[in-house]
Amino acid sequence: MKSTVMFGIAAVASAKEFPAFESFIELHARSYQQGSAEFDQRKALYQQRVTNAAIQNGSPNKMWTAGVNKLSDWSEVELKTLRGWDGASTAVSSSRSIARHNTFLQTNELPEEKMWDGLETFSYTKNQAACGSCWAVASSTVLEAHNEIYNGKHRIFSTQQIVSCTPNPKHCGGDGGCKGATAELAMDWVMKNGIADATEIPYTGHDQTCTMGSPSADMDHALLDVTGAGTGGASIGMTGWSTLPVNEYEPLARALAETGPVAVSVAADTWQPYDSGIFNGCGKDAVIDHAVVALGYGVKDGKKFWVIQNSWGQDWGEEGRIRLERHDESGGYCGMNNDPQKGVACQGETAAVPVCGMCGVLFDSVVPHFVKVSK
């Protein structure tokens, strides 16, 4: 009983380290009027987040540190708008996908660490804002990274075009656009149609009419010689895409080690307070509801982790990123997604599915295939 009381006292003391609500709303330019119902509701939300953060930070065995950030006064409904993707690998298959799985089922020893953070693609973090476009942000970012790796140049692709143009007739991961879809659908659309640059179709964070743009405007003639075509994904050197084997560790690690960044699915409902460290705040049972980019993996002080780039802006987490605890043993951290309709499944798919890895990170991973252009 004594240790519980002391822990509670420590949490209260820690809570005092966070800014008062009035300072918070000034910092983030909120327009709540003191004395209004909204002010009181937001303040209650904020104070609960502060209390939760203090409890996390007071834990003697903590692996990560919680903080307050621009999301600390958002309601759960508002936070759900940031999570608009699933991991429904059955949503679509790519007839033009090459080496669908066997590329990743090799036996060469994997390096202890691999990071792609040196790419210009990861010199900044996109902000999806209040649009459930994480699936499109993750897809466009992964495509940018692979384009940079294989074509030797950095281009910013139009996330907005993916949001506006990708069809979602089976309502996989949501109702499409800002209401959610999947990385598989995004990759399939780009493979068939190509993609414009963000300067041509800039991101608005809203649903809007599909604009095709000119995906071949920055086409390299050397690339035309290699691909034999200048339309669809071939216009950027893309030859296909693959969904990695579900809930398996090595295929994701190998794809990162040997191919490039990967679009992965996660349960992100506990991510809001994350500030730094190796996050282990998801239970084994997890509802997959968000799409992010795995850009590498590493180890520090004996603790293994995945490095994940989120789409909530540079001012969240570790400069827009989160490190997830990494379990590299087979079946090391597995549970169930008991409510896939909240984020994972296509319409009508209600059966529970197994998920593995911290926050279900091994559940569904998508990687594009590119050809390397000789210069």
Image (cartoon, grey):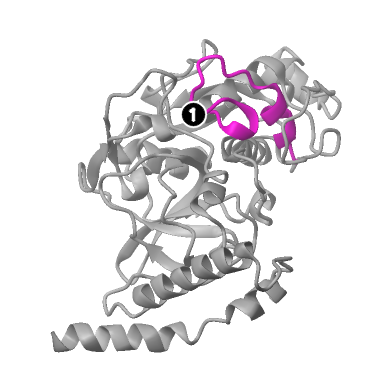
Q: Position of residue 103 (x, y in %)?
A: 41, 27
Picture quarter with the C terminus: top right
Which residue sits at x=50%, y=86%? 17
Left or right: 37, with 98 as reference point: right
Q: Position of residue 292 (x, y in %)?
A: 52, 44
Residue 258 appears in the rendering:
no
Q: For mark 1, what is the residue?
A: 173
Residue 359 place in picture, x, y as percent = 36, 48
**On screen, 127 above or below 373?**
below
- Which stretch is magenta? 156-181
Looking at the image, which is closer to me, 78 or 260?
78
The picture quadrant where one finds residue 43 is: bottom right
Query: What residue is shown at x 33% (from left), y 50% (from top)?
Result: 358
Where 255 falls versus 60 (above or below)?
above
Residue 198 belongs to magenta span: no
Q: Is residue 153 left or right of residue 66?
A: right
Is 321 left or right of 346, judged from the image as shown?
right
